[in-house]
Image (tube, rainbow, N blue to C red):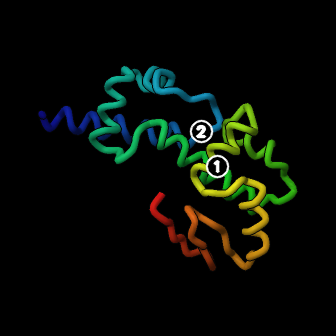
């Protein structure tokens, strides 16, 4: 593959990540993102394959779940259904299923455990995070 093609793919991947970081609340799909970047869905898939280490959907899910976990702990008065909407889910049940798949706990249970261990603690991928140090378990 030509160096210029690799550079274009790298740039496309970087731009896709930036759009996801800014617009994860929106109903993003691969075709919508590709259109926003003046690309094709296939080119975007190739860029993710070459430089992402994950797919577009996995990338979007990771951003949404990370923000959701932060909101659940940092904003305990905000209902779980509202957190779901804030991170881009129209249905709380879909959010809860995705959250459980990522963290192994329901959002409400995650919140309770984190608040119980407050002192900066939160749970990520089944392992604990204390005093702001991030330790991520295999997920």
Relative to 101, say whether 50 is above or below.
Answer: above
* Mark positioned earlier in the residue sequence (2 or 1): 2
**Distance from the alpha carbon under mark 2 to that under mark 1:** 15 Å
Q: Is residue 138 left or right of residue 118?
A: left
Residue located at (60% from left, 57% from top): 103
Relative to 5, say whether 40 is above or below.
Answer: above
Comparing 2 with 112, the one in front is 112
**Based on the displayed image, in which of its 4 quarters is residue 10 positioned?**
top left
Relative to 72, say whether 32 is above or below.
Answer: above
Residue located at (67% from left, 36% from top): 88
Residue located at (39% from left, 23% from top): 41
Q: Position of residue 98 (x, y in %)?
A: 62, 44
- Under tag 2, what secondary structure? loop
**Based on the displayed image, in which of its 4 quarters is residue 27 positioned?**
top right
Q: As drawn, which residue projects farthest toward the right?
A: 77
Q: Is residue 7 left or right of residue 137?
A: left
Q: Which mark is residue 99?
A: 1
Residue located at (48% from left, 43% from top): 59
Residue identified by numbered label 2: 24
Total numbered labels: 2
Q: Position of residue 52 (x, y in %)?
A: 35, 44
Q: Position of residue 62 (x, y in %)?
A: 53, 48
Quarter in which the N terminus is drawn: top left
């Amino acid at each position: 593959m030509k160096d210029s093609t690799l550079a274009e793919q790298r740039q496309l991947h970087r731009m896709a990540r930036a759009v996801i970081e800014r617009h994860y609340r929106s109903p993003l799909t691969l075709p919508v993102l590709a259109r926003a970047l003046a690309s094709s869905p296939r080119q975007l898939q190739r860029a993710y394959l070459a430089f992402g280490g994950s797919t577009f959907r996995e990338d979007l899910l990771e951003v949404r779940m990370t923000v959701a976990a932060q909101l659940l702990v940092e904003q305990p008065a905000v209902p779980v259904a509202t957190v779901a909407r804030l991170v881009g889910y129209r249905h709380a049940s879909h959010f809860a299923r995705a959250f459980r798949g990522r963290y192994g706990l329901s959002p409400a249970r995650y919140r309770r455990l984190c608040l119980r261990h407050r002192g900066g603690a939160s749970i990520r991928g089944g392992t604990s995070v204390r005093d702001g140090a991030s330790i991520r378990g295999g997920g």
